[in-house]
Amino acid sequence: MDKGRRAVLVVGLVLALTSQATTQRERSLDIYYVDVEGGAATLFVSPSGESLLVDTGHPGTIDAERIATAAKLAGLKHIDYLVTSHHHLDHVGGVPELNARLAIRNFVDHGLPTAQELKDNEALYQAYLKVRAGGRHISVKPGDKIPIGQLDVQVVTSGGERLGAPLAGAGAPNPLCRDFAAKPETPLMGGENGRSVGLVIGYGSFRTIVLGDLTWNKEHDLVCPNNLLGSVDLYLTTHHGLNISGPKALVHALRPRVAVMNNGPTKGGAPEAWRIVRDSPGLEDFWQGHYSVKAGRDHNAPEQFIANLDETGATCAAHWIKVSARPDGSFVVTNGRNGFSKTYKPRT
């Protein structure tokens, strides 16, 4: 081969490799907030193509089919890691039907349900165990990490416990703690909700948080007297936007730029909880899975930011909200109902 042709081939190879490397660098972390009408199902697809699903919605075929549809849209043939935040019907119920459609390889949870939960819903737990036996089970504690390629997935709560030390760059005193008022420890404030597996997920400079149904007083312990979490770009409201989660001391300390609420038309979306998020310093936009019927127009986002307006049940179109995040901290949010997208620049 003559020198000229060899040089051309070498240059071509370098350009091809550079283009491939650039494409890999530019791949996004994609997040699908799947509409399971007041349950929970959040699908993360890393730039490496690995998947992490947090919760599976309710029992039956409807929610499982909706999650499988989002997974197909993301090009997935299986779920690498399923995190069950806690053993409540609307978070773990969809496991059997989903696994029948999309094999789950690793099952992550906080361990055994509470004795009361096991007594009330033993059949639900046994159905979960039967499916879990077909994969690898991982019981996590605060401080553990879930190994997803190119992501930093940190467990911050599990089994009623929280981090013992701040995340990198966090730990500053939180002045919002002075005005915090604890709520009575009712059954909803404890039990499985208070044992939720909570995650902080990072991709480069981008950070988001998912706390399951962690409760008001437990969330306080994550940020008071010192903020163990730091700030996030994207906040998924805890507990579907019910007012027994999401205290100001937590939400405002996180300083999210964008929030998403996985509410149903008549579940979650409490005006008090909505207002705390809406008033968070630096919040640019608030997106919702559903229009909250009981909250009224004063406590709902503008319609272009709401994925589902007034449909419910099997006839619901089940539009998703999708986030595509870049390692520089920028991200795009898209409404699956109307195609409306908005780009958010890196935090300055």
Image: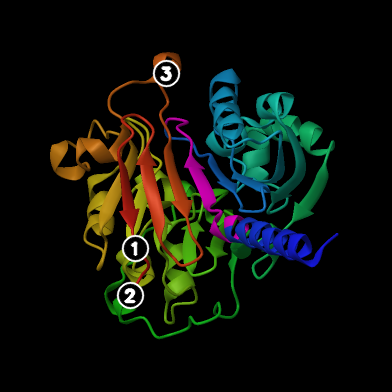
Q: Secondary structure at mark 3?
A: helix
Percent of width and height locating residue 267? 36, 34
Percent of width and height locating residue 168? 55, 80
Tags 1 and 2 in contact by the CB under 8 Å rule? Answer: yes
Callout 1, which amino acid?
Answer: Lys
Q: Is residue 134 left or right of residue 204?
A: right
- Identify the residue at horizontal 62%, vertical 42% (top origin): 87
- Identify the residue at horizontal 25%, vertical 67% (top origin): 282
Task: Single out the residue that lies furthest toward the left.
Answer: 298
Q: CA distance from mark 2 to mark 3?
A: 42 Å
Q: Secondary structure at mark 1?
A: loop
State yes or no: residue 164 in magenta: no
Q: In the image, which disc is placed on residue 348?
A: 2
Q: Secondary structure at mark 2?
A: loop
- Identify the residue at horizontal 34%, vertical 70% (top origin): 249
**Which dot, 3 or 1, sits closer to the camera?**
1
Pointer 2 local density, CA inside 10 Å: few below 14, some 14–19, many at least 20: few
Callout 3, which amino acid?
Answer: Gly
Callout 2, which amino acid?
Answer: Thr
Tags 3 and 1 in contact by the CB under 8 Å rule? Answer: no
Q: Quadrant of the N terminus?
A: bottom right
- Residue identified by numbered label 1: 345
- Identify the residue at horizontal 56%, vertical 27% (top origin): 69
Report which quarter residue 129 is drawn in.
top right
- Residue identified by numbered label 3: 313
* Region in magenta: 23-37
Pointer 1 local density, CA inside 10 Å: few below 14, some 14–19, many at least 20: few
Tags 2 and 3 in contact by the CB under 8 Å rule? Answer: no
Image: 198 above or below 311: below
Q: CA distance from mark 1 to mark 2?
A: 8 Å
State yes or no: residue 31 in magenta: yes
